[in-house]
Amino acid sequence: MPTINFPKDFIWGSATAAYQIEGAYNEDGRGESIWDRFSHTPGNIENGHTGDIACDHYHRYEEDIKIMKEIGIKSYRFSISWPRIFPEGTGQPNQKGLDFYKRLTNLLLENGITPAITLYHWDLPQKLQDKGGWKNRDTTDYFAEYSEEIFKNLGDIVPIWITQNEPRVVSLLGHFLGIHAPGIKDLRTSLEVSHHLMLSHGKAVKLFREMNINGQIGIAPNLSYHYPASQKPEDIAATELSFSIDARWYLDPLFKGSYPEDALEHYKNKGIELSFSQDDLKLISQPMDFLAFNNYSSSFIKYDPTSESGYTGADSIVENFEKTDMGWIVYPEGLYDLLMLLDRDYGKPNLIISENGAAFKDEISSNGRIEDIKRTQYLKDYLTQAHRAIQDGVNLKGYYLWSFMDNFEWAYGYNKKFGIVHVDLETQERKIKDSGYWYKEVIKNNGF
Ligand code: IFM
């Protein structure tokens, strides 16, 4: 008997994203995405890796669904490649692209696996980038057009929908740091982009309601709990500001219909005065059915007047923590604190952990197994904290493990392994890791 029991109907899921697994980048009429352009540009991705072939999931989805079934995964979260549906970003939809997602969705359903669709997981059609990408407000209308097409085709069979995945990463890494596609480095642009991503979410939710889709819809920002490096007032203030910039910037518009004042003030002091119309904020703050969020780690923040933002990560604190292969600290209590904060500050929403997992180096041992003890321990510790929050009254409805299989980890190429299923990139052979077998038992017992 498990000692940690999850509520009946808890959603045990696993997640991936189109560009990270599909491959078939130029097949069946798929258009170019900004990630094709970015990864094909030398110097952007470790080892020059690309998503051209990736896990070849486009051709191997049947085998992948078989493995999901073997593990007992109850819900599979995947994203749709916008340029597979609209190669030009807008205009005529590509029937072959739609057919692929229909085949995938139907096979999931036949196998008793609930499909959960993410509409945007970063692969904007390059043609839309050529028109200004997410900086261009028109992109929010193109996104609505694309969402409408997907709702029309899959709305009657897919019960769970996520509009945008990690708008903060798109804005910061893609448009301020320039280390993700489309590789832009401009603060003002990154802020305009973040607003347009949120607006596109609002437009998709509006359509979803107008079309009477019989499912649930939400968004998936990446969130982590921020702790002050000390109890000094300046560290506490710096921590609040950093959390406003990283998290409340997305949460407040969704739940309160406004952007956080301290973050607006911070940007104003940098010479960027932002104002947003009430109409936009009304669209963004339409009620969602759930808030999904991706969580991997936590941050410790200290006041630092020498840094551009006025704060930095407290290296002296985190150096003693265990870290994953991404360099992210393992701090499961941070998930508990985050769940409690969301519950307290945002009106007890239904919550879904739409991503959680760990990259560690794997080796196939002589007995043929992949004994990924660290990943299993990480999952166990994070799920323990998720369960603790449920016990304390948080409305946590589900958990999607990132990732179903090893895949293209953006700027790191294939060098970071998050999967509970190992993928041999030479042969495309799949192998369930020990963590996958552990997850299978967790799902079977609804706990551990
Ligand atoms: O692989 C990514 C995913 O695409 C978005 N969330 C974080 C994961 C791990 O970095």
Image: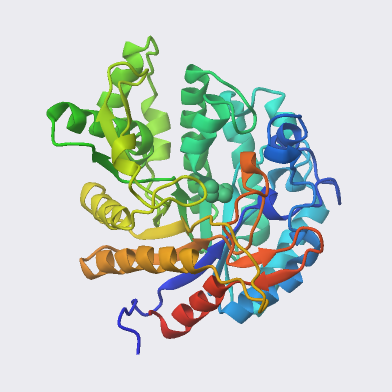
Q: Nearer the viewer, residue 448 or 266?
A: 448
Q: Nearer the viewer, residue 232 or 262?
A: 232
Q: Position of residue 239 (x, y in %)?
A: 25, 33
Q: Is residue 335 above or below residue 239?
A: below
Residue in view at x 35 percent, y 19 percent:
307
Residue 344 falls left or right of residue 111: left
Q: Nearer the viewer, residue 233 or 444?
A: 233
Q: Position of residue 53 (x, y in %)?
A: 79, 52
Q: Is residue 262 above or below residue 283?
A: above
Residue 238 falls left or right of residue 365: left
- Quarter of the rendering occupied by the C terminus: bottom left
- Quarter of the rendering occupied by the N terminus: bottom left
Residue in view at x 24 percent, y 33 percent:
240
* Displayed quadrant of residue 77: bottom right
Q: Position of residue 380 (x, y in %)?
A: 39, 69
Q: Position of residue 364 (x, y in %)?
A: 66, 69
Q: Nearer the viewer, residue 36 or 383?
A: 383
* Displayed quadrant of residue 178: top right
Residue in view at x 41 percent, y 77 percent:
9
Residue in view at x 28 percent, y 34 percent:
301
Q: Is residue 415 above or below residue 314?
A: below
Residue 37 falls left or right of residue 286: right
